[in-house]
Image (cartoon, helix red, strand yellow):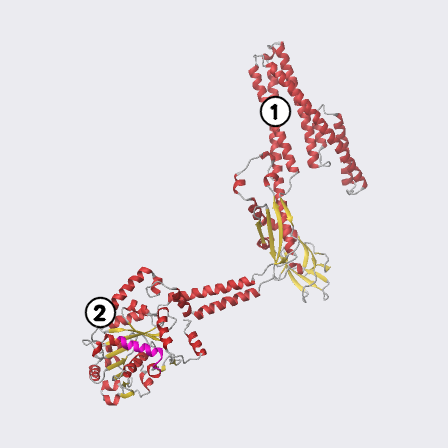
Amino acid sequence: MFPPSWHALPAWMERPPKLFERLATRMTEDQNLHGALDGAFGGQSPHLADYWQVITRRLWLVLLIFGVTTASAIWAVSRQRTFFRSSLSMQVNDPLSRSRSLTSGARVSRLDIFVDPMKSEIELLRSTPIALDVVANLGLRLKPSDAEMPRSTLFTQTWVAEDAPDGPLELRYDGAGQTAQLFGPAGELLGTASVRTSLDAGYVRFVPQSPPGEERTYRLDIVPANWVTVEVTGGLAAVPRLDTDIIDVTYTTADQILAPQILNQAAEALRNYGADKVKIRAVGDVEFIRQQLDSARTQLRRSFRSIRDFKESQDFTNLTVQEQQLVNQIQATITAIGQLEDRRDALEQLRGDMENSGVLEVDLVTFLAILPEGVNPQIRSMADRMQSRQQEMQRLLTEERQTREHPAVQAVSVQLEDIEGQLRNAVMANLSVIGDQLGVRQAEHETVRASQRLFPALENRLEELQMQQGIDAQNVQFLRAQLSQALITAASASPYVDVVNPAVGATPAVPRGQLNLVLGALLGIILGIGAAFFLEYLDRTVRTSADVETLLGIPVLGIIPRLRKVEEMETGEREGLPMIVALDPLDPAAEAYRNLRMNLMFMSTEEEPIQTILFSSPGPSEGKSTTAVNFAVMLAQQGQRVLLIDADLRRPALHLVMDVLREPGLTNLLVGDADPREAIRPNVLPNLDMLPSGPFPPNPSELLNSRSMQRLLEEFGGKYSHIIIDSPPVLAVTDAAVLGAHTDGVVLVLRSGETEQRAAERAVDQLRRVGVRLFGAVLNEVSTSTAEESYYLQYYYSYHPKTQGGWQRLREGVSRARFW
């Protein structure tokens, strides 16, 4: 028994289990309060060092993932191709001033307010119609089968017919590499040409280049246009300049020669697309206005007829002579104004046709047919002469098949230009005269109307008819003006996108190898740390004293650091258990066993002395035998008589440590085959006797729970101060539970990072179920990488004499960072 000096203890220490039960309850409440993460660090708020300890425990996993991702990034960077980038700048002008018809006036739509024209043009540039135009004009359907080979290294200036069939082709060079032959899918020869000269194969044409390598045969493919549009749009990138209407466009590809060609062609296609859109809209406006103008003219003629019918009615004969004269004057002025307007319309139409269509395309037959009377005869004469010259030009071009460079054609062309200039000047002069005459007639008409208002008879009716006539005339006038504006817009339709700086070459794109390496390494670190914390989350083992006290509700009597002298065979059976207390009393582990001895001595009282102690564990290989041996040696070094009993009748190990025979032993004493003097090995160490297990019995549990075992313990209790018993694991067999009932209590040994939490809980429940007193637990094989115990163990190591070399300390430090 322990000395009586330890008996007088404070009341709060007489029942330590209850104290620790209250502590465990409080910690459980704190854990629920702070969440699952706080619970992982012992019910306290995690410190930065706690996170670092999680990483160091899985350091090899972090390094492995980091190495794999970094190596993958290096491999990917080494496989990168060289790309070239070409740039172009284009200006997007105001689409309202160029594309919108003048018939719209200053009207602004909601789209003009909410839509960014710069972004719209960028999206148009990346659209499929623009890409298809680029593919068609540059012949991009023809490409080498080897995706790594740039197209311009084999051929340039490519053209592929729209109806060219998809399929493979083969380009062959002669031995000197100076002549190229193109073969079709069936092996038929399609064309032959020298290098750097055009090779025409019917539906495909290109200029072959010198072979880029030693090979003389290369496979080509004609692919669908839609496949190539993805490559075209994928390489385009456009960014508008800040506070300007300029867009910077770049194209990146592996073909240095093709990059600027694609970029310039895409810009040209965008320009043509905008111009076509403007022209189509203007032509539509012209057709619509002409339809409305025809309808308005019909209505105006209807108004004239209404006034004439009114004047010829019975009411007209009843008017006074003066009223009849005024009416006649009004009719005369209206008729004169109508004739002048007809002449003006005919001349304006002729002028518009000459400006829009050119001298050759003017329909003079129709013009002479609709030319009203009263027009200057000189204009009719010029029109006849121009018509005869047009017919002469058509005869030379169509019947005699002369080119436009032929002298006869050139002579007629000069005559047409001369007549066109004279006719244009005559038309402009007549339009000016007609305008003046219209002004005089309209002033005369207003004067007569003012005189007519003096006569009340029939004025209301005539006013209505004349008002309608005025409205119809204004409509015709407005539509004529709109038609003129629409014709001008259609004739002057032009792109509203201008290329400021065309693409003239391509430069190597800045490689992103270094950035990719940094990102790969950073990704490896992130994935490695994430995997470490994920495994920490999945880890359900007992690691720290806080885990023991929180989960099991028992105190931690000792924290034993990882021993450096443990050796295990491949089968898992131990050759020997380290008696660190006897071999190296100054080792930090020996000091930890002294701390275990002190804690147990505090628990021994005069009413409940602690003499017989059983060491067990939830499962095998958790250090119960090592702890029992070192604890027994520690008591023996204190000068007390100690008996160490190997009660593990299934897998005994203590006889190997003490280097004694296993038989006779405990089994012989229980069955009566030997007496204690024969079975007990005296003084295996000073003050330490040992009782080995003996032969393997067929019924270990029955022997340990027998009356003979109880009598032996009572007999040994009178001879020894302490009896230390090493038993089998609690969960593996029932030996520990039945044997613990005959002892003063049990110390449960748990291996940090190995013992499952559920196994430890089941072991404690099983011992408590049979009424065994649990002194507490010993946390064995604790690593300095454990966050909560690292500072505690560092004090041990800091006070331990430094006997190791630098390399040994480095190897030991690395061994503490475990993969699992």
User: Does residue 308 lie above or below 808 as drawn?
Assistant: above
Q: Which residues are magenta?
A: 584-599
Q: Quadrant of residue 213?
A: bottom right
CA–CA distance in space, label 1 to label 2: 117 Å
In the image, residue 588 lies in the stretch drawn in magenta: yes
* Horizontal side, residue 428 vs residue 763: left or right: right
Residue at the (69%, 37%) spot, across then down: 357
- Residue identifier under label 1: 473
Residue 162 location (% of width, % of height): 64, 51
Residue at the (57%, 50%) spot, across then down: 239
User: Does residue 408 lie above or below 225 as drawn?
Assistant: above
In the image, residue 589 lies in the stretch drawn in magenta: yes
Residue 43 location (% of width, % of height): 32, 64
Residue at the (63%, 17%) spot, across then down: 447
User: In the image shown, does 552 or 477 lie closer to the viewer?
Assistant: 552
Main secondary structure of the magenta stretch: helix
Q: Looking at numbered disc 2 in the image, what kind of residue is underneath it?
A: Trp
- Residue identifier under label 2: 12
Residue 511's disc is none
* Horizontal side, residue 696 vs residue 110: left or right: left
* Horizontal side, residue 685 vs residue 105: left or right: left
Residue lying farthest right? Answer: 407
Residue 421 location (% of width, % of height): 75, 33
Callouts 1 and 2 close, C-beta under 8 Å: no
Q: Of callouts 1 and 2, which one flags the residue occurring earlier in the amino acid sequence? A: 2
User: In the image shown, does 19 or 411 lie closer to the viewer?
Assistant: 19
Q: Looking at numbered disc 1 in the image, what kind of residue is underneath it?
A: Ala
User: Does residue 744 lie above or below 327 as drawn?
Assistant: below
Q: How many numbered markers are drawn?
A: 2
Q: Tag 1's secondary structure?
A: helix
User: Does residue 604 lie above or below 65 as drawn?
Assistant: below
